[in-house]
Image (cartoon, rainbow, N blue to C red):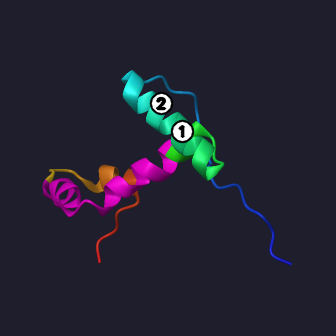
């Protein structure tokens, strides 16, 4: 038997200002996927780590060890 593990750990309430269009997009996408709006944002924003330009930017930052650890970026 494979046990179910919590997917989103260390969550805390956060407040962001989003446009009405973005809020509706997240809401309708959540309905479509059967996820909560928070889960949709978790999944979508996780994709930012696939942006090679962003990763390159982080790599070039001075004292980037803390940032890389926070983002789960490890040197290959």
Q: Nearer the viewer, residue 17 or 9?
A: 17
Query: Where does the C terminus fall, quadrant-wise?
Result: bottom left
Whether residue 57 is visible, yes or no, is yes
Q: Residues within 10 Å of mark 1 (few under 14, many from 20)?
A: few
* Residue found at x 86% / y 78%: 1
Mark 2 lies on residue: 24
Whether residue 10 is visible, yes or no, is no
- On the rendered structure, is 38 left or right of 51? right
* Residue found at x 63% / y 41%: 36
Q: Nearer the viewer, residue 35 or 59?
A: 35
Place of residue 42 in the rendered image (x, y in percent of width and height, measured from the top left): 50, 47
Establish if 37 lies above or below 70: above
Q: Is residue 75 magenta?
A: no
Place of residue 10 in the rendered image (x, y in percent of width and height, measured from the top left): 60, 43
Establish if 3 lies above or below 36: below
Q: How many marks?
A: 2
User: Going by the picture, which residue comes out furthest to the right?
Assistant: 1
Q: Residues within 10 Å of mark 2 (few under 14, many from 20)?
A: few
The magenta segment is 41-60
User: In whole angstroms, how far apart are the C-alphas of marks 2 and 1?
Assistant: 6 Å
Q: Name the dominant secondary structure of the magenta segment.
A: helix
- On the rendered structure, is 63 left or right of 8? left
Q: Is residue 49 magenta?
A: yes
Mark 1 lies on residue: 28
Q: Secondary structure at mark 2?
A: helix
Q: Nearer the viewer, residue 32 or 57?
A: 32
Q: Where is residue 57, by image quadrant?
A: bottom left
Place of residue 73 in the rendered image (x, y in percent of width and height, measured from the top left): 35, 63
- On the rendered structure, is 40 left or right of 4? left
């Amino acid at each position: 038997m494979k046990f179910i593990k919590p997917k989103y750990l260390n969550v805390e309430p956060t407040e962001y200002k989003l446009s009405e269009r973005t809020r509706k997009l997240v809401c309708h996408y959540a309905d479509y996927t059967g996820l909560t709006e928070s889960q949709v944002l978790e999944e979508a924003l996780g994709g930012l780590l696939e942006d090679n330009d962003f990763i390159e930017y982080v790599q070039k930052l001075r004292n980037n060890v803390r940032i890389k650890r926070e983002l789960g970026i490890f040197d290959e």
